[in-house]
Image (cartoon, grey):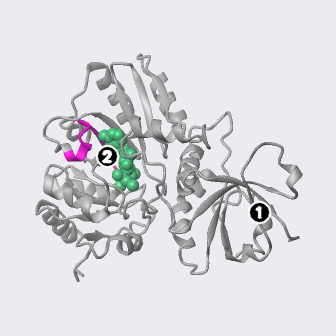
């Protein structure tokens, strides 16, 4: 293992990180969403090594991080109407957790775009990420710094645990100065794609910039584009929904962000089988089985299991989606610390009809859904608790 894996987050450290990026090395760095695994986006060999380190398929495109709007425009080939939408979105949301996908200019290696010719760009708001982009003067391609399919990292130690032996370097943002910015949102950026031909904004991934906020931004412009989103939760037991997602958005694999332990969403706890009127999948557990279960809860929905299970944690006992999203990935990693845990129960997230534009409930729901690989069930306890 490289003994110099850790890079100080000082000016000197940033110079070193920039030199390493210029030499084609990989440097993980904190953002306001999750840690990213960075490479010089214009160096195809360096980009290739991201895929190798993560064990990521080449069909999954990378997000490119830039320092300012002009640097973003140097990489994008926008139609006039796309330029207007791009301006409105970038002015409102950047620096911040919004990735905008549009046609890539030839300067971007095809591998970054997973051969689609479209690239996602964002300006992160984390001060250390911005300093790295400024010092290196490079566009930095960076997926989340986890092994492919595993839970995204919200601490430098998560990056080390997943990728520490792959020859990467890590710039930590977990000290006193930067920790208040590091992975503040806790889930990845919202990803939108501009489609000037159909005059549509397609939301490919829900995140901290909510659908409601995007709609509000667009409604303030003179341009009448419509906003569409991929609704992963609409068709829970229908395999075709994930096929559609695969076609629309490369890299939108259903199983993602998953803990190494099998996980399932508990829609409801039944007190007897007659309580379930619909044709639903029911998981039957007795009192002894529960001793091997770890529960991640939200808004105290599964609180009645607390004293019967191996371990219990609530992402937000008062139902704050912002707090819950902030805690989710660390909690999923926490479930892996129990050697005798056989299954993780996750909470069901109900998306109401009127959502405040700061409420990141859709992003939270998406990540929990993916952590459970879309598996939802009713729970019936056969012994008395
Ligand atoms: O918050 C974030 O976005 C973090 C930090 C490090 O910036 N990055 C991140 O990257 O989450 P990654 O690679 O783990 O997830 C990016 C996802 C891809 O898996 C894919 O689903 C979508 O964004 N994406 C990126 N570029 C795309 C493109 N050109 N076309 C379609 N989907 C794209
Ligand atoms: Mg990722």
Image x and y of residue 213, in percent: 51, 34
Image x and y of residue 200, in percent: 41, 23
Work out which quarter of the rendered image holds the C terminus and state it: bottom right
Name the side, left or right, on which 182 lies relative to 309: left
Dividing the picture into quadrants, the one containing residue 313 is bottom right
The residue lying toward the viewer, choosing from 150 and 15, is 150
- The residue at 19%/43% (across/down) is 110
Marks 1/2: CA distance?
Answer: 47 Å
> Is residue 121 among what the camera can see?
yes
Q: Is residue 261 above or below residue 95?
A: below
Q: Residue furthest left?
A: 23
Q: Which residues are magenta?
A: 111-125
Q: Nearer the viewer, mark 1 or mark 2?
A: 1
- Characterize the local packing of mark 2: few (<14), some (14-19) or many (20 or more) Cα atoms within 10 angstroms: many
| SS label for mark 2 | loop
- The residue at 60%/57% (across/down) is 324
């Amino acid at each position: 293992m490289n003994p110099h894996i850790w890079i100080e987050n000082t000016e000197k450290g940033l110079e070193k990180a920039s030199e390493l990026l210029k030499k084609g090395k990989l440097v993980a760095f904190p953002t306001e969403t999750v840690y990213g695994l960075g490479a010089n986006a214009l160096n195809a060999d360096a980009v290739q090594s991201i895929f190798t380190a993560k064990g990521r398929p080449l069909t999954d495109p990378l997000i490119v991080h830039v320092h300012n709007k002009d640097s973003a425009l140097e990489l994008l080939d926008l139609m006039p109407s796309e330029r207007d939408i791009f301006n409105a979105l970038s002015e409102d949301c950047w620096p911040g957790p919004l990735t905008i996908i549009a046609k890539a200019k030839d300067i971007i290696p095809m591998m970054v775009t997973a051969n689609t010719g479209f690239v996602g760009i964002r300006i992160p708001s984390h001060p250390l990420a911005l300093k790295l982009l400024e010092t290196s003067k490079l566009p930095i391609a960076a997926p989340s710094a986890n092994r492919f399919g595993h839970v995204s990292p919200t601490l430098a130690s998560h990056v080390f645990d997943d990728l520490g032996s792959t020859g990467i370097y890590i710039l930590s943002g977990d000290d006193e100065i930067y920790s208040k910015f590091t992975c503040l949102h806790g889930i990845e950026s919202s990803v939108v794609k501009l489609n000037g031909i159909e005059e549509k904004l397609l939301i490919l991934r829900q995140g901290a910039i909510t659908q409601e906020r995007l709609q509000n931004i667009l409604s303030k412009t003179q341009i009448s584009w419509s906003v569409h989103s991929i609704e992963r939760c609409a068709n829970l037991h229908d395999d075709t929904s994930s096929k559609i997602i695969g076609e629309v958005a490369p890299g939108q694999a259903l199983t993602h962000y998953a803990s190494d332990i099998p996980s399932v969403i508990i829609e409801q706890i039944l007190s007897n089988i007659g309580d379930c009127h619909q044709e639903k999948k029911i998981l039957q557990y007795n009192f002894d089985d529960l001793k091997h279960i770890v529960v991640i809860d939200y808004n105290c929905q599964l609180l009645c299991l607390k004293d019967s299970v191996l371990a219990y944690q609530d992402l937000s006992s008062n139902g704050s989606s912002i707090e819950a999203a902030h805690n989710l990935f660390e909690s999923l990693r926490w479930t892996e610390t129990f050697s005798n845990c056989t299954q993780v129960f996750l909470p069901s997230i109900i998306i109401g009809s009127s959502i405040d534009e700061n409420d990141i409930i859709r992003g939270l729901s998406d990540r929990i859904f993916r952590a459970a690989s879309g598996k939802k069930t009713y729970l019936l306890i056969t012994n008395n608790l």
